[in-house]
Amino acid sequence: MPESLTRAVRWDTVVGALLIVLLLFSFSFVDGFGNALNLSFLIGNTLPIALIALPMTLLVVSGEIDLSVASTAGLSGAVMGALWNQGLTIEAIIPICLLLGVVCGLVNGLLVTRLGLPSLAVTIGTMAAYRGIAQIVLGSDAVTDFPTQYLDFAAGRLGDTFLPQAFLPFVVLLAIAVVVLHATPFGRSLFAIGASEEAARFAGIRVRRHKLILFTVTGLMASLTGIFWALHYASARYDNATGLELSVIAAVLLGGIDFDGGKGTLGGAVAGVFLLGAAQNVMSLQDVSAQSQIVVTGVLLVVSVLGPRVARQISVARAGRRATAPTPTA
Amino acid sequence: MTHPSDAGPAPVLALKDVTKSFGAVRALRGVSLELFPGEVHALAGENGAGKSTLIKTLAGVHRADAGRVLLDGEPVVFHGPGDARDAGIAVIYQEPTLFPDLSIAENIFMGRQPRRALGRIDHKATHAATADLMRRLGVELDPDRPARGLSIADQQIVEIAKALSFDARVLIMDEPTAALTGSEVARLFGVVRTLREQGAAVLFISHRLEEIFQICQRVTTLRDGAWIASEPLADMTEDDLVRRMVGRDLDELYPKQDVTPGEVALSVRRLTREGVFTDVSFEVRRGEIVGLAGLVGAGRTEVARAVFGIDRWDAGEVEVQGRRLTNGAPSTAMAAGLALVPEDRRAQGLVMDMSIERNIGLTGLRTTVKAGLMDRGAERSRSLDWAVKLQVKYARIADTVNTLSGGNQQKVVLAKWLATGPKVLIVDEPTRGIDVGTKAEVHRLLSELAADGVAVLMISSDLPEILGMADRVLVMHEGRLAAEIPRTEATEETVMAAATGRAAA
């Protein structure tokens, strides 16, 4: 029965439809939503979530998770600021920070694949560790005097449109992620690993290598996001991007990626990201406090984990009732 | 319908023209069945023939759409399993579910223990009643022992004792022997005979035909939900029964072709995994089917896992077609031409939530690729090809494999591996839990593969299968190869002697 398939497709569609409804509603009824400045804020503020959501989607599909992404981003920003204070050029600093992200991801991946530890536990640990290192590196300083052409790129818009310049590289990365997950043997293997790691191993799939690659790429993308963050907000601090992992995971799960692995699409995940981003933007425009927004994100996270499950229970119950329809209750 | 004797007693439980549908599927179509006291009655049929639905109808789980259930000749309606139990009908399932932390006696009298004053449980009376039940069954089990750690065979005995404590007159046993060893089956049959002598009616379901002939007096056969026959087993042969079940003459169950072995395709030398198996050496030649026999836990599956690379070995080496395999690397084993159809098809052989197409496709991730991307057309035609070749019965190739019957799932696993064009094929319990028709198909397939020059290593606990299919039989005992027996000398006695360590190699 392709029931699970149609259900998954429906969930993607539901999220996409919700996004469209929210956008239509906001354009019509929310003051200040539709102007180009706000839209560019919306997209610019959502880009960090979107960038990390790409590898996170692949990771969750394969049955793993990385909670240390925001700390990796913060660490990258902090190291960037510290090295800038040391007088290195930005062209030298960026590769160093990206390499640092790779190392952070590699550490997560090795702890998970070599020691067989659950990624939830490992990355809670490294989440604290990476953030701590960031504070040691930069203390409570804020570095703001990065070269203007970089700051302009990270904050600027494409011509006369409301799209941030950084949106283009994101679209390229998104296209790569879609192809990798949905059109390559690598992506196919991730679905198999997430659905049944043992069966994947018996089919000759190199499970540990796949996971190690994913963790490493996630670290790389997290550090790229950290660099973007510091430039976009023209501020490198050790506590940059704090709590971002919550938004990323909420958005990915909201997009229909099964927390148990093996199911989901990148389209759904990206719809989830922008749904969350638009909701946060609308709340800001309505003067909802930042604290309340975090509450909403948390509730969305719970709902997005529960939603597909409840839907499944209902469909199973319905199928069961159909199967035993002629029988009165036992 | 034929009765056991003209002057026989009345049936204690009967179904008359029972029909039961689930949606569009008609699971039972006018089925009748009579169970007499003092009789063990077999229910035979392939997977999907309607056996489970029939059992559940007798046990009050399902209610018939049409037709009647007769208890002592009187029509009854069961509104649930409780009604059936109160009427003296008990079902013993393949894998019982006991409370592990409670004692055997507490499990049997759960919720209705004999009471003393003030509602306190009378442990002495509970113990005595349980001991009495065990005596009636002719089994020695300590009533105070916790259920945790009991073998499946012992757990079934507890369930049977529980049924007796309810004064069950009809016992329905749903594949009780599937997970039992030979001696456990013998003890279970002793208990069943005792029950029969005490006047119980037993309905017995098993895929193992020899067991049906051993323990049952009559048999009712179902096919595609329809009643085919109810008849005494005394005048029947196994072939007769198979014909009733399958609806045609079955091709031979063990269609082994004679093949002259070619060069060595798989060579295992002094392979050791500490604490699991030791110093295992053997060869399999092209065209050969080599049986690997032994008791459960002798290390057969573990050797296969190590050879394929799932587990690492500590010493020794493996060559496929002259290529040394890397330790612990299934992908290099596959590249060398090795395929493993694992023991547990649901956990290891298949991704149950994935489609038939993609499950077969999983072994082709290196081949159905164009410019680094999945070639979906090639993947689909490869999967369709093999699903059709192996006659997998499915509605759509995009359906998930958990919608298929066990036999068809096993065919998908075979398809997945045959699609890689293996030179060496290891099959671990290739026909466990699948019906006799599919079993014969799998055997024919293995035989044809061998004739085409594939080297086949077949692990099986089904001794007739080993004897019927293998050119040579390797026997493992406690982690070591105990014997190598050529086809001409392989008998149940020689193989079992080696498997139990009674004979030197």
Image: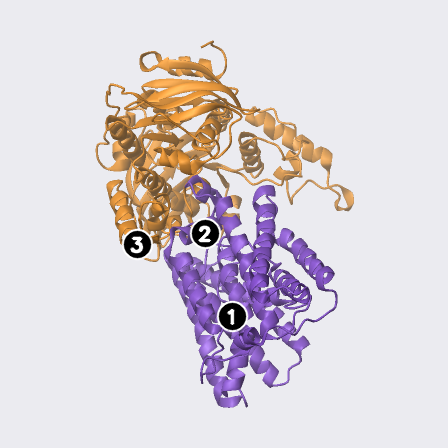
Chain colours: A purple, B orange
Q: Are marks 1 and 2 in contact (CB under 8 Å)?
A: no
- Chain of the residue where label 3 is placed in the rendered structure: B
Secondary structure, mark 2, is helix
Callout 2, which amino acid? Leu
Secondary structure, mark 3, is helix
Callout 1, which amino acid? Val
- Chain of the residue where label 2 is placed in the rendered structure: A
Front residue (pair B49, B62): B49
- Badge number at residue A190: 2
Camera sees residue A253: no
On the picture, is A255 further left or further right than B422? right
Q: Is A276 drawn above or below residue A223 in the view shown?
A: below
Front residue (pair B381, A113): A113
Q: Which residue is mark 3?
A: B376
On the picture, is B322 further left or further right than A49? left
Q: Is A207 drawn above or below residue B197 in the view shown?
A: below
Q: Are marks 3 and 2 in contact (CB under 8 Å)?
A: no
**Residue B53 image offset from top left, x and y in percent:** 39, 46
Q: Is B215 drawn above or below residue A279 in the view shown?
A: above
**Residue B141 image offset from top left, x and y in percent:** 62, 27
Front residue (pair A310, A240): A240
Mark 2 Cα within 10 Å, few/some/many (few <14, many 20+)? many
Tell me, yes or no, whether dots 1 and 2 are on the same chain. yes
The answer to which image quadrant residue B160 occupies is top right
Residue at position x 39%, y 16% from top?
Answer: B492
Q: Which residue is mark 1?
A: A273
- Label 1 and label 2: CA atoms lie apart by 21 Å
- Label 3 and label 2: CA atoms lie apart by 17 Å
